Amino acid sequence: MIKYGFIGTGNMAQAMIKGLLGKGVSANNIAVSSPRSAAKLTEKWGVISLSAQKLIDESSLIVLAFLPNQLENVTAKLDFQDKLVVSVLAGITLEQLISATHTTQIVRTLPNVNVAINQGVTAFSKTELTTTNSTTFKIFSDYLGSSVVLAESQFAIFSAVAGSGPAYVFKYIDALAQAGIANGLEAKLATDIATQTVLGSAKTLALSTQTAKELQNAVTSPGGSTRAGLDDFDTHNFDDVIAHAIKATVEHKHL
């Protein structure tokens, strides 16, 4: 029996597969189904390429990872039996998933791109009738990063913070690097310094019992240069800029 079967091989499916392989899951325990790209992934990673129904028949856990607007067409002739179905389809509710798949064994998830390096965070929501075991949470929590259980009504804000958040972090890193370049650093060096600073700071926070605000103050001396920079952030309403960006993201996604 194959452990993980992916119907669809888009960016998120490939990120998840890459993360699983990176954690030592055998390619023989991963199956993919896609009319256009399954064969390419078989050649690239050694995963098993199967038709959608055969993949369902032979897999323990089924991941729906195609374009959301393809849900009805893809599932129309498939029998999901009593298999556990995990959806990563953005904007598709549990109700819609149940209607399309004719099974209540559905878990709706929203991973972020960092699952590819086993540092993702994934939101979960499931039906009351879903009989889940540790398998679902193991794939996301043990192999691909961490997971949180949320009501579907909170998926939009989760997506804004965790799904879109990486792009905003990259923008911040680029802004740090550009400031370094403007003040005389070579471009690659500035980017490397900014990247490692953000990486190390995030790790420090993750390992600390202090809040982000407390750590911010811990590295700031009264009247010092860091305080001058933080005061400038406040003068230019940095927190409001972030809040407005998240609000715009939530309102645009309509999850």
Image: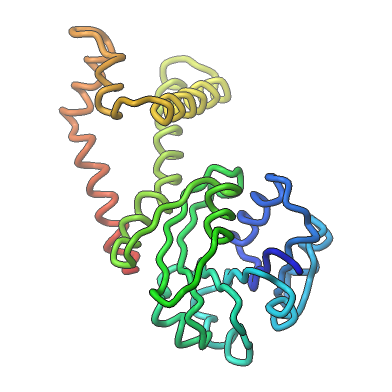
Left/right of residue 106 with respect to residue 31 in the rendered view? left
Percent of width and height locating residue 119: 54, 42
Task: In the rendered view, tell whether residue 90 sits above or below residue 181.
Answer: below
Q: Nearer the viewer, residue 222 or 146?
A: 146
Classify the position of the C terminus by image quarter. Answer: bottom left
Q: Residue at x 51, y 77 (%)?
A: 105
Q: Nearer the viewer, residue 235 or 109?
A: 109
Percent of width and height locating residue 174: 45, 33
Percent of width and height locating residue 111: 49, 56
Left/right of residue 39 with respect to residue 241 in the rendered view? right
Task: In the rendered view, tell whether residue 239 sits above or below residue 3.
Answer: above
Q: In this view, which residue lies farthest toward the bottom?
A: 77
Q: Residue at x 57, y 49 (%)?
A: 144
Total marks placed:
0
Left/right of residue 105 with respect to residue 228 in the rendered view? right
Residue 178 in sight: no
Q: Nearer the viewer, residue 2 or 74?
A: 2
Protein image colouring? rainbow
Left/right of residue 21 with respect to residue 70 in the rendered view? right
Q: Residue at x 19, y 8 (%)?
A: 222
Classify the position of the N terminus by image quarter. Answer: bottom right
Residue 97 in sight: yes
Q: Residue at x 22, y 15 (%)?
A: 228
Percent of width and height locating residue 152: 33, 67
